[in-house]
């Protein structure tokens, strides 16, 4: 079967790596695990032996039935031919249950998948995700405030999860080898909206506004988003320098600024 580059198909062929990814989920003997993009089953095969219930979502209409056939005698394995982005994860998880997610992600939709996982995390159905992505994207997801890679994706991710950088693999771990290195992250879903006193939709929109132009100061981005100089003067927390950029602020002062500006509306 020919691989389909358009579907981000780079199959994992490094045996130690595929075990390490599954090991990162910990003990899954009593867990429901959702696998994104099982492909030819490199990770699926190990998960099927270890977890209570495996739900694997594969878009490729040749690979999905081939996997369903291969695992037909394993009653804990469910292969679904579906587009992850068009799947409501809440429908896969029974009431009063939570699931873990795993996947060597199709890199062309990494950010969209992460946003989908954060939304599912907010609804309380996911505990953790072990996900492999292009190294540069993983560096942005896990970057701390004040470093060059810190931006909208970092702030969004860290509002939703504790992010842990696990390991990086070279192109040779895959067939065909991609042009980039790949990094595995563990995300433990722990939304911080309540703790920081912000509403998720409003704060997500605010993050998009303050990171709209990375090289501009916070005040310039806020002005472009429609805040007046008077509103900013009335609300500006003394702890935030007037010339600060969004990328230099931790989530706590960012939330403080959002709350103060919201109070002026
Ligand atoms: C990087 S490969 C990983 C395959 C396999 N898990 C492995 O590690 O060898 C990504 C997989 O995601 C599948 N895929 C691509 N787009 C998808 C989508 N929108 N929904 C579900 N699966 C998708 C591809 O067909 C491919 O099998």
Image (spheres, grey):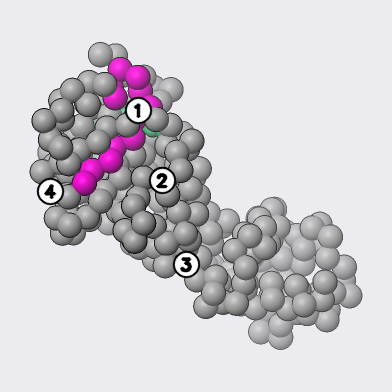
Which secondary structure lies at badge 4?
Answer: helix
Q: Where residue 20 appears, x then y in whole percent?
A: 17, 49
| Circle number at residue 185 | none
Give whichever of discs 4 and 3 has the lower sequence position. Answer: 4
User: Which residue bears the numbered disc 3?
Assistant: 191
Residue 228 placement: quadrant: bottom right
Q: Which mark is residue 50?
A: 4
The answer to which image quadrant residue 8 occupies is: top left
Q: Residue at x 82, y 71 (%)?
A: 265
Q: Secondary structure at mark 1?
A: strand
Q: Which residues are magenta?
A: 53-64
Inter-mark Cα distance, 4 to 3 = 28 Å
Q: Residue at x 48, y 36 (%)?
A: 86
The tag earlier along the polypeptide, 4 or 1, is 4
In front of the other: 255 or 79: 79
Circle 1 residue: 81
Front label number (3 vs 1): 1
The residue at label 4 has a CB less than 8 Å from ligand 1: no
Rendered image: mark on residue 91: 2
Q: Is 182 part of what is drawn in magenta?
A: no
Q: Is 240 on the left-hand or right-hand side of 10? A: right
């Amino acid at each position: 079967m020919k691989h389909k580059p358009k579907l981000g198909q780079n199959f994992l062929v490094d045996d130690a790596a595929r075990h390490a990814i599954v090991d990162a989920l910990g003990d899954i003997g009593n867990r429901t695990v959702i696998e994104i993009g099982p492909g030819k089953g490199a990770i699926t095969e190990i998960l099927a032996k270890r977890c209570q219930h495996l739900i694997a979502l594969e878009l490729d209409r040749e690979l999905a039935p081939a996997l369903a056939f291969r695992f037909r005698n394993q009653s804990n394995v469910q292969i679904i031919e579906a587009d992850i982005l068009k799947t409501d994860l809440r429908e896969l998880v029974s009431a009063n249950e939570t699931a873990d997610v795993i996947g060597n992600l199709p890199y062309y939709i990494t950010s969209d998948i992460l946003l989908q996982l954060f939304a599912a995390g907010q609804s309380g159905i996911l505990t953790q995700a072990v996900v492999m992505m292009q190294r540069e994207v993983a560096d942005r997801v896990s970057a701390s405030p004040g470093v060059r890679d810190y931006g909208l994706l970092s702030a969004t991710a860290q509002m939703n999860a504790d992010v842990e950088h696990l390991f990086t693999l070279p192109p040779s771990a895959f067939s065909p080898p991609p042009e980039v290195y790949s990094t595995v992250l563990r995300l433990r879903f722990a939304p911080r909206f309540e703790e920081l006193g912000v509403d998720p939709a409003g704060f997500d929109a605010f993050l998009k506004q303050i990171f709209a132009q990375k090289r501009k100061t916070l005040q310039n981005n806020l002005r472009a988003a429609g805040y007046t100089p008077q509103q900013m003067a009335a609300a500006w927390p003394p702890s935030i320098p007037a010339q600060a950029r969004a990328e230099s602020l931790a989530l706590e002062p960012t939330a403080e600024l959002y709350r103060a500006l919201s109070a002026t509306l």
